[in-house]
Image: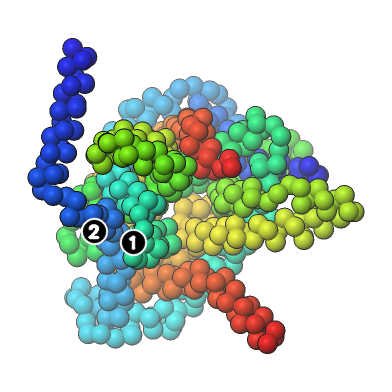
Amino acid sequence: MGPVIRIALAIVLALVAVPLLIVIIVSFSGDERLIFPPGSYSFNPYSALIGNDAIREALWRSLIVGFQVVALSLIVGVPATIALVRYQFRFRFGIAMYLILGVATPLIASAFAFLVLFTQAGVLGALWPISVGVAVVNLPFLMFSVASSLASLDPRLEEAAATLGAEQVQTFLFVTLPGIMPGILSGTIMVFVLGISEFVISLLLSTVSNQTLPIAMFSSLRGPPPPEVAAAAGIYVVAALLVVITLTSLKSTEQFFYRAD
Amino acid sequence: MGGSDVAFGWRIIDAIIALGKKLRVERLARVRPYLMVAPAFLLVSLLAVGIFYLGWLSIHSYDSFLLKQGPISTDQYRRLVEPPSGEFYANTLWRTMTMSLAVTASSMLLGIPAAYFIVRTSSRAWRVTVLVLMLVPFLMGEIVRTFAWFLILANRGALGWFLGLFGIQDGGILGTPLGVFVGMLQVSVPLVALLVMPAVRRIDPNLERAAATLGASPARVWRHIVLPLAWPGLAAAVIVVLLLNIAEYDMPAILGLGRLPFVANVIGDIYTLQQNLYLGSAFSLVLLIISSAMIMLPFLLIRLYWVYFIARKS
């Protein structure tokens, strides 16, 4: 491969990887003020994180939002994707386009739309409106993942099951569902991680008393960042890294990003 | 025990089947796809209703002293363009668009070669490593990316330290457009690469080899084979990355030190500082309309091209 591609790749890898390294290193800083390179190393940021009630509660809220987003996306997303991929019906294309409205709208406009809607409904201050908003915006990621899995599942397998006398329920449970499980799994992981790290929607829909972790981190970045923020960031980086390694070792993700013909 | 558990599972399935027969669900076969998409449709409709509500609020005046909605008027849109703050809003919109376009263009320049490398490299280890590193920024969240770049670009950050090794003094580039620009690249470049990859994957490598054998330089191979054939992927990447960038919030707020607000920051401030949902709705809608126009533009250009092409032929 030519030198131009090599140079571009080197720049890309630096842009992508250096920040990850810096966050990990600084999360073990022993200093009062976060600088690079740290003057000394310790586990202080992590113990400060455990000791900080506000940050710990925000982390808990983010996890709840993550689980709610996953539950909601799975319940509405999996049947819809199966219908869109497997059945021919009127308005199929239009409905598919409609369902990805969340990624076609600038995030801040979606967030403001949810803000005015939920303000009018008087439900602001609860955690579930945040989950609903995040689920709508990230639903397409689950659907893409399930759809790519479904597309690589031979429909003749389902027909064969039906021919051999399986009822529709049995065909679905024992043929379709196991077949698309990898896609459901990678989609679920992706939607969960996007949910716990979501920012703009939480920013507009959260109140002072129910901030999620990204919002709490943002608030503390207004001044010199306290060490526990470095620890929280370190956890996010490691979690994202673990998830990505899991995802890439799943066959469905390799199909999703790098389809083998 | 295991055997009876399996039997129990089967009995449940039998019961479901029997129930389905009793309720005669096969009557629903024709509407089944619609029933299956209905929950997702309703969920997304919350956003659609919210957007319509944005439009409704944006065409009303608002009394910020009495906190009361006024009659239908063009007040909010006039406030976006007229003095005293019209110029500020226009500048913000201009900054958002120009910075987003610059980031998108640079991301294409860096992301396309990266996608090409991932698809064409013969080493699986390299492919997986690059893929993993590109996916991580996407999943770690906007605020963590911003924090990482804060640590790099700040006064006593990693960049200053690195330049210091070569004896270069640097006060950090926080608060400059360059800082925001570099930070935004971290997620835009991988996104371009991920979206362009499937398109590059569909190009037959033999075409490139044939061109090279016939004496085409690498630049000519790219110009006449790779880029034209990857065109749909490139268009998709431009749209998605541009959409992501014009809604950017954290990078301008933290890396720009608030001196270089984007539309999203101003909309956030309108809500938190002025508590004015009406003006915020109008600005959100302006951004939404601009972004929709940007999504439509490629299709419109293709359509125009067709009209022109057919008109010239006949």
Q: Residue at x 42, y 69 (%)?
A: B288
All told, the count of numbered labels is: 2
Q: Locate residue A255, reporting x and y percent.
A: 52, 40
Q: Nearer the viewer, residue A65 or A180?
A: A180
Give the residue type at disc 1: Phe
Q: Residue furthest right?
A: B215
Q: Quadrant of the C terminus of chain A?
A: top right
Q: Residue furthest left?
A: B22
Write down the residue under mark 1: A89
Q: Nearer the viewer, residue B208 or B271?
A: B208
Height in image: B46 above or below B92?
Answer: above
Give how far apart the Cα atoms at labels 1 and 2 are: 9 Å
Badge 2 marks a residue whose secondary structure is loop
Specify few, some or many for label 1: CA neighbours under 10 Å numbering under 14, 14-19, or 20 or more.
some
Q: Locate residue B42, reporting x and y percent.
A: 25, 59
Report whether residue A257 is seen: yes
Image quadrant where residue B178 sits: bottom right
